[in-house]
């Protein structure tokens, strides 16, 4: 077995070792537990970097050992260009959230469990993107849910967390069940659980079967993406969760739905089977885009404003995928990455704001720009970024998504509406920014400076966004290769 | 040429950083130096002739290239000259100069404005226009406490963004068919587009141009900027952005060559804008309104270029920009400016006529002649009206001084103007943004109240119905109870019949057997040797012997 295959295994094993160490080390302080978590996640990132040259040569790296032999189920991992983009996004976001969590109050008690669960959450997402066996995929998929539910349940804000975590669990689990039905149907029909073999064989299934499976997968994964009206779990879960968990939920976990759609219906079934769903995906994307933006506009809680913006942004991604064009798909993959960076940035800004003011209503906060200029600059970068201002990332992905819309067979008017609908994003983004940093409603008793432990990671993410926006070619290359993986069968 | 392009792009950025970080350095000196260097650089570039540059740079896998042509350079040099004049005039007047931040904004806009002028690739041009739009909007904010400035920033940014979205739609429509972002190739390829697509793309371009050039009714952001800004900073909103709009129009004009429909659309936009401007401004206070008069110029421009591509359009743009400068500087107490204000547009248009006479463009000339005469006549007529108190000079704003007390509403046009003023200009545009904003907010609030906030109660209701009160659930419970009872009965019966009773019976039998065995044991254990049974082994021996005998034969 080649060294690179062992390295691939390390992406899942290292966080697992971190979890075991944390569970054993019950007396670990928050700093110690955080350090273990950060080291585990950094090593996983390092492995990805080490694997990159091999991936460039081979287009896919695989690791496989038998698991349940008589059912032909194996512990198979595979890193290809599609999974790379999502994996890097997820690992980076988790790493940033862990660093950020060191500076805030969550997880002071039972720190070892807190960081162990964060690692488990990350492990679930890494495994989801790497799994080459559908049963393994589902195990990791549910691991992700269990970890996040526990994090909200134990460290969430207020008594409402019990209700919210239950709602989050039930709604997303319903989506997961639809996915499970799809996975089992594939397994039963094709007699294999291996994703690559399924990709090769699924196109041979009767068209009707492909279509109903596509419907199952689309609805199931759309729940995770929080597309209107399947988004009902998101605003509460994002609001109640502690800030680092919110960052991971919004910036990384939502993208798992996108990965699922690209990996299952899109990569497996024939274009003929997916085609009838394209226009509905675009319409759902448009509605989600406008609806999420309107809700963000109506909302007063600054954390919920950013939470609703996720519903809106996921709309763009679904729209891009629905175009069924190369530009649209690439745009959707790019949008996942840029959205992750911007959403992490905006939630970090909101976290600092809540930390220094102790308030969450936009009506109680104002005029903070002069007092906290660095925070204001970070927020400005995030707000302009999410509004699609070049060269702040989302401009690049929106350009490709809209370009895909015009290139698709769907009536042009739908793309024009989506394009004009993006103006609503500007409305809520400026309302948030103007409301928080301008005016004279400055709350009393503010600290002289924003906490450095929170501000520095926030600034780092803002700078990263600027760099990624100005130099998008690497990401674009990944997205292009990811598209080739979906439709060309590469990797 | 490449070096000069790099110089003109990077130097203003460097200057803006200098102003941001070296606060002790005077903003005026840096800005003046920057303008002088930019003029020198642009002039040098102009003198090198025309050509295309393809630096080894790409963005989003699209090559970046620059088209260095005389027309954009001419406009850019004119803009720099205007900026220099504005700085000079306000230095002479002893007004407060810009802060370092504001001067930095001007420098940044010099850099990105330059790129917007010379970019030969649409994505780069779009990005540069977007950034200039942002700088224009940011220039409206004075400080973090300035809520009014923030409101104007939002308004301007959103309007300009709308223009950008129209531009984006147009670019993407053309790119789809031409599969390139090279402006020249896209425009050339547009001739082969289906009519539907080319109409959509062209309308989007025209809307984008209208927004950027401040053509009515998209001129409110110019008015807001003029009302609030230091004149030097107003250069961004009043000169640079409209000039970029003019130049965008210039670049996309070839699309409509030989297409009567598109020509008609261009003219219709221009004429509607012109008419709107007159009707909306017809009953406004007299005096010089920069925004209104420059709106006339922008609308007139669209009418002029509707039918044919006039040569020397670059010079005409320069003339329009200088006219705007005169308008901005106009003061009643300066006789030169009073004279210039009337003479200059005439001179510009006269030169334009003379230049175009050689090209023999009668259609354009006729349209131009008729419309400019109408515009100037109406403008003159407006300026003859009595002026209300407090409305002298500057921006006329959107106030209606009408009520029939000063103006005779003798003509249908004037009545129409009154109606537009009251109902459209006053009611919709003056408070339009606020109304639209509150409308959107109300819609968002309604959606939040009626859909979003009802998700949870609806789910709870559904859950309650399903779990507690639904007939299905009750039947299900009853069914389960019935089945349970039956199973319990069956199980009990089975338990008694199959488990308990046989067990009892077997236990009894075992007891009985054990008892019998015990009795037998008791009876036999005390007996002496049983002679009476000796016959059994003897009999077995006899049988054995018998079998042996038989076996031996």
Image (tube, rainbow, N blue to C red):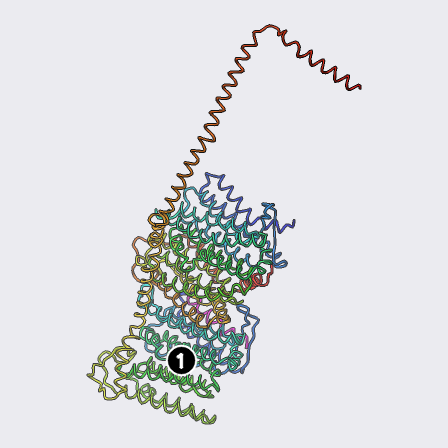
Q: Residue furthest top?
A: B528
Query: Which residues fall within the magenta stretch?
Result: B1-20
Residue bearing mark 1? B82
Secondary structure beneath dot 1 equals helix
Q: Is residue B551 left or right of residue A479?
A: right
| Residue B509 vertical position relative to residue A35 in the rendered view, above or below | above
Q: Position of residue B448 (x, y in %)?
A: 33, 60
Task: Tell which of B246 and A210 is nearer to you.
Answer: A210
| Residue A164 vertical position relative to residue B541 in the rendered view, above or below | below
- Around disc 1, counting alpha carbons within 10 Å, would you say few (fewer than 14), some (14 to 19), or many (20 or more)? many
Residue B17 magenta-drawn?
Answer: yes
Task: Tell which of A409 and A182 is nearer to you.
Answer: A182
Quadrant that contains the N terminus of chain B: bottom right
How many numbered discs sit on the rendered protein? 1
Residue A152 magenta-drawn?
Answer: no
Task: Tell which of B485 and A443 is nearer to you.
Answer: B485
The answer to whether one can see residue A471 in this image is: no
Quadrant that contains the C terminus of chain B: top right
| Residue B57 vertical position relative to residue B504 in the rendered view, above or below | below
């Amino acid at each position: 077995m080649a060294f690179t295959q062992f390295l691939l295994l390390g992406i899942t094993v290292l966080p697992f070792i971190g979890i075991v160490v944390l569970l054993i080390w019950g007396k670990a302080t928050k700093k110690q537990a955080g350090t273990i978590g950060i080291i585990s996640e950094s090593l996983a990132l390092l492995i990805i970097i080490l694997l990159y040259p091999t991936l460039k040569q081979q287009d896919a790296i695989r690791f496989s050992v038998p698991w349940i032999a008589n059912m032909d189920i194996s512990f198979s991992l595979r890193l290809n260009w599609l999974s790379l983009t999502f994996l890097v996004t997820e690992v980076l976001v988790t790493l940033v959230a862990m660093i950020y969590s060191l500076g805030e109050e969550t997880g002071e008690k039972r720190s070892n469990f807190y960081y162990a669960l964060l690692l488990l959450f990350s492990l679930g997402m890494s495994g989801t993107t790497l799994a080459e066996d559908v049963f393994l995929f589902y195990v990791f998929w549910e691991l992700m849910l269990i970890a996040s539910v526990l994090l909200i349940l134990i460290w969430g804000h207020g008594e409402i967390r019990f209700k919210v975590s239950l709602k989050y669990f039930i709604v997303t689990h319903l989506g997961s069940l639809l996915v499970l039905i799809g996975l089992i149907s594939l397994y039963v029909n094709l007699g294999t659980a291996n994703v690559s073999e399924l990709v090769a064989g699924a196109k041979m299934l009767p068209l009707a079967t492909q279509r109903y499976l596509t419907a199952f997968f689309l609805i199931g994964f759309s729940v995770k993406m929080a597309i209107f009206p399947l988004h009902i779990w998101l605003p509460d879960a994002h609001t109640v969760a502690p800030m680092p968990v919110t960052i991971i939920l919004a910036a990384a976990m939502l993208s798992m739905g996108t990965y699922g759609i690209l990996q299952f219906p899109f990569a497996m079934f024939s274009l003929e089977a997916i085609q009838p769903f394209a226009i509905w995906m675009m319409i759902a994307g448009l509605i989600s885009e406008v609806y999420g933006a309107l809700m963000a506009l109506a909302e007063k809680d600054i954390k919920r404003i950013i939470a609703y913006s996720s519903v809106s942004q996921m709309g763009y991604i679904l729209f891009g995928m629905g175009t069924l064009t190369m530009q649209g798909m690439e745009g959707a993959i790019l949008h996942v990455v840029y959205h992750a960076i911007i959403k992490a940035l905006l939630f970090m800004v909101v976290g600092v704001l809540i930390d220094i003011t102790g308030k969450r209503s936009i009506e109680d906060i104002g005029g903070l720009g002069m007092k906290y200029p660095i925070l204001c600059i970070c927020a400005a970068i995030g707000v302009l970024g999410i509004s699609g201002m070049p060269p702040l990332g989302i401009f690049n992905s929106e350009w490709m998504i809209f370009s895909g819309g015009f290139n698709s067979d769907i009536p042009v008017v739908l793309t024009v509406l989506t394009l004009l609908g993006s103006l609503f994003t500007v409305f809520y983004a400026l309302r948030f920014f103007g409301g928080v940093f301008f005016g004279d409603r400055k709350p009393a008793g503010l600290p002289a400076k924003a906490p450095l432990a929170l501000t520095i990671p926030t600034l780092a993410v803002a700078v990263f966004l600027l760099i990624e926006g100005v130099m998008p070619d690497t990401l674009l290359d990944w997205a292009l290769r990811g598209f080739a993986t979906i439709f060309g069968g590469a990797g | 040429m490449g070096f000069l392009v790099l110089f003109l792009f990077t130097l203003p950025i460097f200057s803006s950083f200098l102003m941001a970080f070296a606060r002790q350095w005077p903003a005026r000196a840096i800005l003046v130096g920057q303008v002088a260097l930019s003029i020198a650089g642009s002039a040098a570039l102009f003198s090198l002739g025309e050509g295309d540059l393809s630096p080894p740079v790409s963005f989003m896998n699209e090559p970046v290239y620059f088209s260095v042509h005389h027309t954009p350079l001419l406009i850019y040099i004119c803009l720099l000259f205007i900026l220099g004049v504005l700085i000079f005039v306000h230095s002479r007047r002893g007004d407060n100069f810009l802060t370092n931040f504001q001067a930095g904004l001007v420098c940044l806009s010099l850099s990105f404005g330059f790129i917007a002028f010379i970019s030969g690739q649409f994505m780069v041009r779009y990005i540069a226009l977007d950034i200039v739009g942002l700088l224009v909007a940011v220039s409206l904010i004075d400080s973090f406490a300035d809520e009014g400035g923030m409101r104007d920033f939002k308004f301007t940014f959103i309007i300009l963004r709308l223009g950008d979205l129209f531009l984006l739609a147009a670019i993407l429509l053309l790119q789809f068919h031409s599969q390139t972002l090279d402006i020249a190739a896209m425009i050339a390829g547009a001739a082969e587009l289906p009519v539907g697509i080319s109409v959509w793309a062209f309308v989007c371009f025209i809307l984008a141009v209208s927004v950027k050039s401040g053509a009515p009714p998209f001129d409110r952001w110019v008015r807001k900027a003029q009302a609030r800004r230091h004149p030097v900073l107003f250069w961004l909103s009043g000169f640079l952005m409209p000039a970029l709009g003019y130049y965008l129009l210039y670049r996309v004009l070839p699309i409509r060559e030989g297409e009567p429909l598109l020509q008609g659309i261009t003219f219709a936009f221009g004429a509607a804008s012109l008419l709107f401007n007159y009707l909306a401004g017809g009953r406004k206070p007299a005096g010089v309104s920069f925004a209104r008069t420059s709106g006339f110029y922008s609308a007139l421009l669209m009418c002029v270029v509707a039918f044919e591509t006039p040569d020397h359009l670059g010079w005409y743009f320069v003339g329009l920009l200088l006219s705007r400068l005169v308008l901005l500087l106009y003061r009643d107490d300066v006789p030169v400016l009073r004279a210039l204000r009337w003479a200059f547009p005439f001179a510009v248009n006269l030169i334009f006529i003379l230049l175009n006479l050689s090209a023999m463009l009668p259609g354009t000339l006729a349209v131009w002649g008729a419309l400019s005469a109408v515009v100037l006549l109406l403008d003159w007529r407006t300026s003859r009206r009595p002026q209300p108190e407090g409305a002298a000079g500057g921006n006329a704003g959107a106030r209606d001084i009408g009520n029939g007390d000063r103006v005779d509403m003798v003509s249908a046009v004037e009545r129409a103007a009154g109606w537009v003023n009251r109902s459209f200009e006053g009611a919709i545009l003056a408070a339009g943004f606020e109304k639209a904003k509150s409308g959107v907010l109300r819609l968002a609030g309604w959606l939040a109240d009626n859909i979003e906030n009802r998700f949870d109660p609806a789910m709870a209701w559904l859950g309650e119905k399903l779990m507690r009160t639904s007939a299905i659930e009750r039947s299900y419970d009853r069914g389960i109870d019935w089945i349970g009872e039956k199973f319990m009965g069956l199980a009990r019966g089975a338990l008694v019949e199959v488990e308990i009773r046989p067990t009892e019976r077997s236990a009894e039998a075992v007891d009985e057997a054990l008892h019998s065995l015990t009795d037998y044991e008791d009876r036999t254990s005390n007996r002496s040797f049983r002679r009476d049974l000796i016959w059994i082994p003897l009999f077995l021996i006899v049988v054995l012997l018998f079998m042996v005998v038989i076996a031996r034969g």
